[in-house]
Image (cartoon, rainbow, N blue to C red):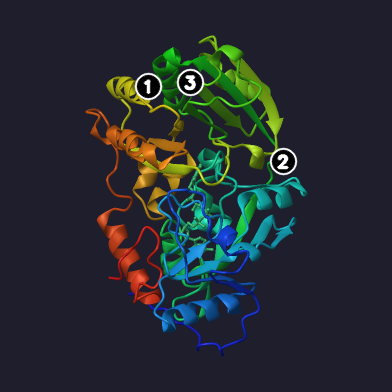
């Protein structure tokens, strides 16, 4: 039985943030999102400064019958952080961060990003359990799960949540934690923005002042052998302090790439270890024995590690994680053949990540079963022209037809799905927050 126990409705307060509409000089910049395929014109963009502002914006949207979109970093592939003709609650002004170095926690505004939190934590020799994609919002990505370099040791980014301050569909302000609204807190570990607007989250920070990382690059022809070796490294159950990815990359960036590989599909390994570089080199030795064309070791703040550069806004894009149930030799060969068909002038990253350690350990505690998948294969593609949409999207979709591709169809199993539906009914029975991976009220 799920009860809200909500406090009485707070009085309406004046709106202290900003409101933008078509015609305002800042409107166009404010409505733009990461994916250039999403070009929507909201009736109103509200930029709240406080939780009361957020409550006022929600009430206005509901009363006026406007579709409500909630926005932080604006990286949602489907364009869930904007709306055509509706009302956007743009949280980017609510980005204050306060670190408690003794308790090793941070209270993070609902619109603050992982880069901002990473910098604030580093000042105290601490690290956030950050998403790999550091321009994303801390709240946005944590509530939907969140996958980062430290996950084999610390779990998904949501596993570092201590509490979430939320404004619900009827404008009330609640705090969810292990002890307050525990069902809501459970649902916020993967249920995303379905239950309200997170105006702040309090997260655990970790005493990891820096991480050792290693980048290895090979010509594309090495992909099959590199993936098999990478698979065997992670199947021997290495320490959770080690994580990594094999990434097929079409535009090898920066200084580590030899000239002969510029602009071509290459095989790359990123390995990250919260111990020393010597330990990292030993753990990853089987891959180093495959004679990479380049090898670069470094020690850096954990927040600085990225899988994919953000790139210029406005490019069209598609991003999709696939939670693999298995990774057979046959599947590896089929993935290699499929990746090699990436269309011209499409920038692609196809990372293969081991999901094990603390990610799997959290599966019984939080909504699953995607956490039990042993591997995650992500696909990110970016291109510049609508004339290339069909080919790029068609290429991504073709992966699902590969005979040996085995991925979970749904993110939640029926029992978790039913429980999430009950929580949704308790906090958002009218499905006001539906621009997300939507959970229907039970
Ligand atoms: C290039 C690229 C690489 C990526 N790599 C990774 C990765 O390595 N790991 C990973 O986990 N994800 C990754 N992602 C996915 C991305 O991190 C998530 O989509 C994340 O939610 C985006 O955060 P954002 O702040 O940009 O969200 P937005 O696009 O602003 O919003 C996303 C969703 O969250 C809701 N939302 C936003 N803010 C709040 C809030 N404060 N309260 C309630 N709901 C809110 C929105 O309504 C929307 O439904 C990647 C995406 C891209 C484009």
C-alpha distance separating marks 2 and 1: 39 Å
Using the image, determine if residue 110 lies above or below residue 283.
below
Asked if residue 156 is positioned above or below residue 339 in the image, the reply reads: below
Query: Which mark, by number, is residue 267?
Result: 3
Sequence-wise, the earlier of marks 2 and 1 is 2
**Number of numbered discs:** 3
Residue 293 visible in the picture: no
Spatial CA distance of label 1 from label 3 is 11 Å
Label 1: element kind: loop
Q: Is residue 12 left or right of residue 49?
A: left
Residue 271, position as x, y percentages in the image: 56, 28
- Res. 264 in view: yes
**Residue ID for mark 2:** 209
Left or right, residue 24 beside residue 315: right
Which residue matches tag 1?
340
Q: Residue at x 59, y 79 (%)?
A: 52
Task: Specify the quadrant that holds the N terminus.
Answer: bottom left
Please tell me which residue lies in front, 132 or 157: 132
Name the residue at the front extreme: 23
Residue 224 locus on image (x, y percent): 39, 17
Q: Are marks 1 and 3 in contact (CB under 8 Å)?
A: no
Q: Is residue 85 above or below residue 125?
A: below
Q: Residue at x 34, y 64 (%)?
A: 420
Q: Position of residue 354 (x, y in %)?
A: 44, 33
- Disc number for residue 248: none
Q: Residue at point 51% right, 49% down?
A: 34
Q: Is residue 214 left or right of residue 392?
A: right
């Amino acid at each position: 039985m799920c009860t809200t126990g909500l406090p009485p409705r707070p009085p309406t307060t004046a709106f202290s943030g900003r409101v933008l509409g078509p015609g305002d000089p800042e409107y166009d910049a404010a409505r733009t999102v990461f994916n250039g395929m999403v070009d929507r014109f909201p009736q109103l963009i509200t930029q709240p400064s406080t939780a009361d502002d957020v409550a006022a914006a929600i009430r206005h949207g509901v009363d006026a019958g406007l579709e409500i979109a909630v926005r932080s970093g604006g990286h949602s592939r489907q364009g869930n952080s904007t709306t055509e003709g509706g009302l956007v609650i743009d949280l980017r002004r609510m980005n204050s961060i306060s670190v408690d170095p003794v308790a090793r926690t941070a209270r993070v505004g609902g619109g603050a990003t992982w880069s901002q939190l990473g910098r604030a934590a580093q000042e105290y020799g601490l690290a956030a359990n950050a998403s790999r994609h550091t321009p994303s919002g801390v709240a946005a990505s944590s509530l939907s799960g969140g996958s980062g370099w430290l996950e084999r040791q610390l779990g998904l980014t949501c596993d570092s949540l201590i509490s979430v301050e939320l404004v619900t569909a009827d404008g009330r302000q609640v705090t969810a934690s292990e002890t307050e609204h525990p069902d809501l807190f459970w649902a916020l570990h993967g249920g995303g923005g379905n239950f309200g607007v997170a105006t702040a989250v309090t997260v655990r920070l970790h005493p990891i002042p820096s991480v050792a990382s290693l980048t290895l690059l090979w010509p594309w022809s090495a992909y099959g052998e590199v993936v098999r070796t990478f698979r065997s490294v992670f199947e021997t159950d290495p320490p959770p302090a080690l994580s990594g990815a094999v990434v097929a990359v079409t535009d090898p960036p920066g200084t580590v790439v030899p000239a002969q590989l510029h602009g071509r599909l290459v095989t790359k390994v990123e390995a990250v270890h919260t111990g020393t570089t010597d330990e990292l080199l030993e753990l990853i030795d089987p891959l180093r024995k495959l004679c990479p064309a380049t090898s670069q070791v470094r020690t850096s703040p954990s927040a600085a590690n990225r899988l994919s550069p953000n790139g210029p806004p406005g490019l069209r894009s598609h991003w999709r994680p696939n939670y693999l149930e298995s990774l057979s030799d046959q599947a590896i060969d089929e993935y290699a053949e499929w990746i090699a068909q990436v269309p011209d002038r499409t920038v692609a990253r196809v990372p293969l990540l081991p999901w094990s350690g603390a990610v799997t350990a959290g599966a019984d505690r939080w909504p699953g079963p995607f956490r039990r998948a042993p591997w995650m294969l992500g696909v990110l593609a970016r291109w510049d022209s609508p004339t290339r949409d069909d080919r790029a999207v068609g290429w991504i979709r073709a992966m699902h037809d590969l005979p040996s591709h085995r991925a979970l169809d749904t993110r939640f199993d029926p029992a978790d799905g039913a429980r999430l539906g009950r929580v949704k009914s308790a906090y958002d029975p009218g499905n006001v927050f539906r621009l997300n991976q939507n959970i229907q009220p039970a």
